Image: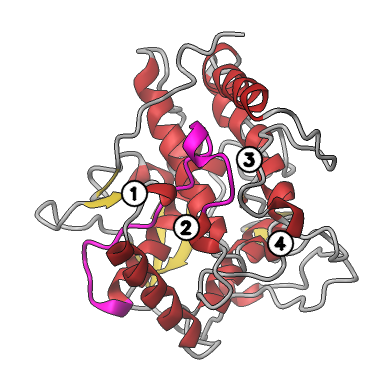
Amino acid sequence: APVQAPDLQSCQTPNIPATAADPSCCMTYRAGTEIIDFMPPPPSSPLRVRPAAHLVDKAYLAKYEKAVGLMRELPDDDPRSFVQQARAHCSYCNGAYDQVGFPDLDIQVHNSWLFFPWHRLYTYFHERILGKLMGDDKFALPFWNWDAPGGMTLPAIYTNKSSPLYDERRNPAHQPPSFLDLDFSDTDLNMARDQQIDQNLKFMYRQMISGAKKRELFMGMPYRAGDAPDPGAGSIENVPHGPLHGWVGDPRQPNGEDMGNFYSAARDPVFFALHSNIDRLWHVWRGLSPGNTDFADADWLDASFHFYDEEARLVRVRVRDCLDPAAMRYAYQDVGLPWLDAKP
Ligand code: C2O
């Protein structure tokens, strides 16, 4: 059977490090709140085209900053507030909810086949809330294009200290022009830039092509109702997704906050750009070969989650509702795939 959307009423103390400065993790929930089933946006609604973060212009940046600023200003208990958005990630990742019917088993949306769909839906609602707050129904999140040389630094738009896109809990050594190592594991190798690019592109080739020929290898292992969490992550979730979180997070904090730990990761606005690119690569993978198709297993298709939408309504949404970005009315700027021929 599929993992079911959690009972928001029974949010529990999360499993997070004892040294966490602020352990709040539960999403706001009022007993009796009506839960509606997800409906895709009308086919006639405008297409939101997500731009590469390193290529955006001033007008776009001004809008994005305004939207995130408005989101940060919402009262903490508004389900659309920045604080609540970050908590949604924490609660689905740090064991705040039990699986419905299995009080001894946590819901965990990482390290399994739920990783791509959960994060797609999470960024989808985040984007629509941002658009709604400033009254722009075309607003699209940027994606951090770390799979191309031009995107292999922390995107500059996030580094302005007076911007709502800034987060002070980041590694000071990894500010631009510090160059990204997609396979980062705690130590900077300080490779020559060309060599690092070459290595990053080869990594991408491996994670997207040679090491992702089987669905489970790319998307992660099956995780059904009653299964223990963390059956196994797909290639991209492992690397570079994991290393990217660690690379951005602040080593001066006790647990690599914000980006370097699940519970705090979504307190950094760059989280959403990192995950837009993850989402884009899922979409790209499906177009690379006729064999690259989503799971047809009903336990995947019918797995469900709860999110708050741009009207602050509580929505129940299934994996099968999120398989077609065009139907969800968003797309990605076409920036090419420089790793396609980076065969090691
Ligand atoms: Cu839910 Cu990048 O992690």
Element type at mark 3: helix
Give the residue type that dot 1 points to: Pro
Q: Residues within 10 Å of mark 1 (few under 14, many from 20)?
A: many
Q: Is residue 186 visible?
A: yes
- Kindly identify which residue carries mark 2: 122
Gap between marks 3 and 4, in whole Å?
Answer: 16 Å
Give the residue type that dot 2 points to: Tyr
Q: Is residue 103 visible?
A: no
Q: Which mark is residue 241?
A: 3
Q: Which of disc 2 and disc 4 is earlier in sequence? A: 2
Single out the residue that lies furthest toward the bottom. 75
Residue that appears at 64% across and 35% down:
240
Q: Residues within 10 Å of mark 4 (few under 14, many from 20)?
A: many
Q: Which of disc 4 and disc 3 is earlier in sequence? A: 4
Q: Where is residue 205? Give x, y as percent.
A: 55, 18
Mark 4 vs ligand 1: CB below 8 Å: no
Give the residue type that dot 3 points to: His
Gap between marks 1 and 2, in whole Å?
Answer: 18 Å
The answer to if 131 sits in the magenta stretch is no
Element type at mark 4: loop
Residue that appears at 76% across and 63% down:
257
Q: Which of disc 3 and disc 2 is earlier in sequence? A: 2
